[in-house]
Amino acid sequence: MKIFIQNLPKAELHLHIEGTFEAELLFKIAQRNQIKLPYNSVEELAEAYHFNCLQDFLDIYYQGAGVLLYEQDFYDLTYSYLTKCAEQNVRHTEIMFDPQTHADRGVSFETIINGISRATADAEKNFGITSFLIMSYLRHLSEEEAFKTLAQSIPFKHQIKAVGLDSSEKGNPPSKFQNVFKASVLEGYIPLAHAGEEGNADYVWEAIDLLGIKRIDHGNNSLQDEKLVTEIIKRDLALTVCPLSNLALKVVDNLKDHPLKKMMNLGLKVTINSDDPAYFGGQVNKNYEAIQVALNLTKEDLYQLAKNSFEYSLLDDLTKQKNIQELDKYYQLNS
Ligand code: ADE
Ligand code: ZN
């Protein structure tokens, strides 16, 4: 199964670039930028990666992102992630980035997007991996702040495919961002959002009804509400599920209790993703491996999950079909 997963062509649809910041690279960039970290070694930093909830994690994640200052930092971070994608047979990625996390330190939108875009262009040239960017609004900040970010993004909008909504979910419902999502859609961005990770099913309802999202990040708590499940299936919205993230942030106590297979059995379209791989103990293939073992998934299940990753990506239909044909060929030869 491990080899089957390793060679399985796949896409990753739920990934925060700031969450790919491995401790070694973080230390290297901190040194380069002469920023003192509250840790003395890579090991000490990695020791801090134990969380009881989403907020515990976010505090460390924002601290880590605080060493990113220059275009080259964003380039190095993104190229390092894409190199790992190439090693895992990831053919396409949809990368979230949080401009507001960096704006506070005076890092311009241009610096961030140029660094990330240069890395995605190089990865396409060197590895054949395609990438789209998702600009995510931080939900613990105000809608007014999100509007500022939207305005800053306009000169670069040809480089951005979609908008997302992330950070502290509880107490920050999707309804808070209804106006900025409407404005983002008018600018041509596809609306996406985290919903139902820690927040309940009502937050998922708001995200699909008020924000009109085309894909649900996490969505675990949708299962609290049968009518919602029926509606998600009717609207053909996929859930980007992140097993090791759910385990690390105690959304589930044990991977054996993870609802992924139940979701699939109900007819929900699900994909497997790493979310913040540097912090949650594994890249996308490790997520496939861990959930395969925990839920005893078959090769057919894994094939279906990989197929969903292309089908529910934001790629055009022709490119989706090309990727799926390659996947089908692989499955025929290896099942
Ligand atoms: N930002 C980075 N990872 C996140 C997650 N899993 N949920 C919400 N915001 C995030
Ligand atoms: Zn996420």
Image (cartoon, rainbow, N blue to C red):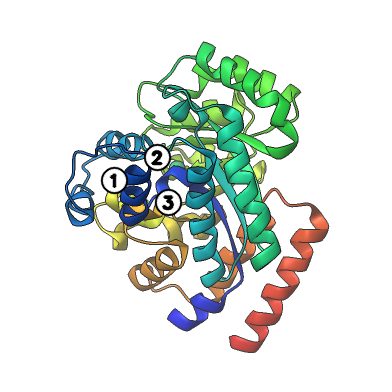
| Viewer-side residue, 111 vs 34 | 34
Badge 1 element: loop
Nearer the observer, 284 or 335: 284
| Tags 1 and 3 touching, CB below 8 Å | no
Left or right: where 310 falls relative to 80: right
Q: Which residue bears the numbered disc 3?
A: 20
Circle on res. 249:
1
Which quadrant of the rendered structure holds the N terminus? bottom left
The mark that comes first in sequence, 1 or 2, is: 2
Q: Amino acid at mark 2?
A: Glu
Say if mark 1 contacts mark 2, CB within 8 Å. Answer: yes
Which quadrant would residue 207 be assigned to in this image? top right
The alpha-carbon separation of the residues under discs 2 and 3 comes to 19 Å
- The spot of residue 155 in percent (x, y) is 72, 26
CA gap, disc 1 and disc 3: 16 Å
Label whose residue precedes the other's in the sequence (1 or 3)? 3
Q: Is residue 237 visible?
A: no
Pick the front one: 332 or 92? 92
